[in-house]
Amino acid sequence: MEKNRPSLDKDYVYIRDRPSDKMAQQGEPEHRPYSATVSIKATEQWEEELLNDPKNRLALSALSANNASSILTQRSAVVADTHNFNIKIGLEGAPITNQKSSGRCWLFAATNVFRVAIMKRYNLKEFELSQAYLFYWDKLEKANYLLEQILDTVDEDLEGRLVQTLLASPVGDGGQWDMVANLVEKYGLVPQSLYPDSFNAQNSSTMSSLITTKLRENALELRRLASRSPDAKQSLGAVKDNMMRDIHRILTIMLGPPPNPDKEMTWEYYDKDEKFQSLTTTPLKFASELASETSIKANSGTNIHELFSLVNDPRNKYGQLLSVSRLGNIIDMRPVRYVNVDMATMKKACIAMLRADIPIFFGSDVGKFSNRQSGIMDTSLVDYELGFNIHLGLSKAQRLMTHESAMTHAMVLTAVHVVNDKAVRWRVQNSWGEGSGSKGWFVMSDRWMDEFVYQAVVDPKFVDKSIQEVLKQTPKM
């Protein structure tokens, strides 16, 4: 991150050299008696030295009374991060979506990718898939997934790390690309007009908390009963069914009854020529259209169902298949898998997909060096080093190892600006409504992508054969 930052004013915080400064320059630490406690005398000296500098007194006045990120925003980054791109997909998808007070970003990003193919297929100006439909089934499947994991771990210590991790957030709103792929395969897709958001889809915390409380109670009961049974899964079927029925009741009351995946629905709409159209189909058949010859042709030869995840995790060897133990949502379906590659490989595939007119689902740590109002994500956006005379030097791998960074948010790439065969900035479709960014659109510097983007979901044909072959490996957990 620090490589592209302007150099700091060396006089910014302190105006006279300290012995420790000279020693540090020579690579030698200052020698003083070690203390395990905070010394009040030392803090008095530090404060006196700090406030002797008029620049620090100015910083104190500005930064103690305002948001530090606002005060330290660099104008150069704001000017550079424009919404001008020389490679852009023709149909980006509209309208801008809004996940409201929920953690459904992955469902919004995925359906925003899916909808582009559907809009091409049905000649639409605007279209939105029902995120709530997938949300409903994901919650129900995650509840079942937890109960199955509990039965599978009855011999584990309840207070051990494994069981405690399973119980920590069993039906959280978040998810992964392979999990949404499972949902679409089993339950299909529905236009939002046929299953719109309820209040609890948009404000999910109460529902999730209630379900989590019930599932933790269920988990303890299953463990108690399973300890008495030599074959818990065979003997506790009715007990588990009753537990799932309770979860189903909560979901149905709070989200509303969803369309049945196998039963016909009728979708009425106007195409972009303002002609009335009507389609009678099932959610599963509607989703299967994404793999039809017509849809694949309309989507530049890409079968949405064949996309897979590239990940950049520098803690692990590149060219390796990665996974996370016991992470999933639907039993006996597609596991969560990532092909670990360097950023150059990931960006090359993304640029190729954008040239082919295909949007890209990607995962990042959106809270780092970003501004929700301006919609700018740039490692040079906020200069904390200038404001506090500190050095922030963690590498991407070190941030992952120390939990300083993680993949927290999914969005969609629709454009890139390339100069001399090098990406400069990327256009991002977010799901925070038109009130964020530039009417819902964000811009990401290429340096920010290097540091804080971890995943991109790509078509196999846009990566080398050697990358495709990694999918055949046994994953490292």
Image (cartoon, helix red, strand yellow):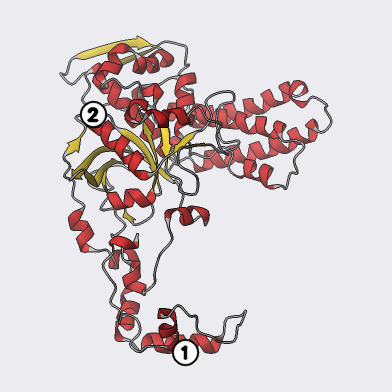
At 64% from the left edge and 36% from the top edge, which residue is drawn?
215
Left/right placement of residue 465 relative to residue 249 reads: left
Name which of mark 2 and mark 1 comes first in the sequence: 1
Residue type marked 2: Asp
- Labels in figure, total: 2
Q: Position of residue 454 (x, y in %)?
A: 41, 44
Q: Secondary structure at mark 2?
A: loop
Q: Position of residue 372 (x, y in %)?
A: 31, 52
Q: Are marks 2 and 1 in contact (CB under 8 Å)?
A: no
Left/right placement of residue 44 relative to residue 420 reads: right
Tell me, yes or no, if residue 65 can be seen here: no
Image-quadrant location for residue 113:
top left
Residue type marked 1: Gln
Q: Nearer the viewer, residue 120 or 205?
A: 120
Q: Nearer the viewer, residue 272 or 345?
A: 345
Q: Residues within 10 Å of mark 1 (few under 14, many from 20)?
A: few
Looking at the rendered image, the quarter that the N terminus falls into is: bottom left
The numbered mark at residue 357 is 2
Image-quadrant location for residue 118:
top left
Image-quadrant location for residue 11:
bottom left
The numbered mark at residue 187 is none
Q: Identify residue for label 1.
A: 45
Q: Can you say whether 64 is above or below 372 in the image?
A: below
User: Which mark is in front, 2 or 1?
Assistant: 2
Q: Secondary structure at mark 1?
A: helix
At 35% from the left edge and 10% from the top edge, which residue is drawn?
280
Tell me, yes or no, if residue 80 can be seen here: yes
Q: Can you say whether 85 is above or below 124 in the image?
A: below
| Mark-to-mark CA distance, 2 and 1 | 61 Å
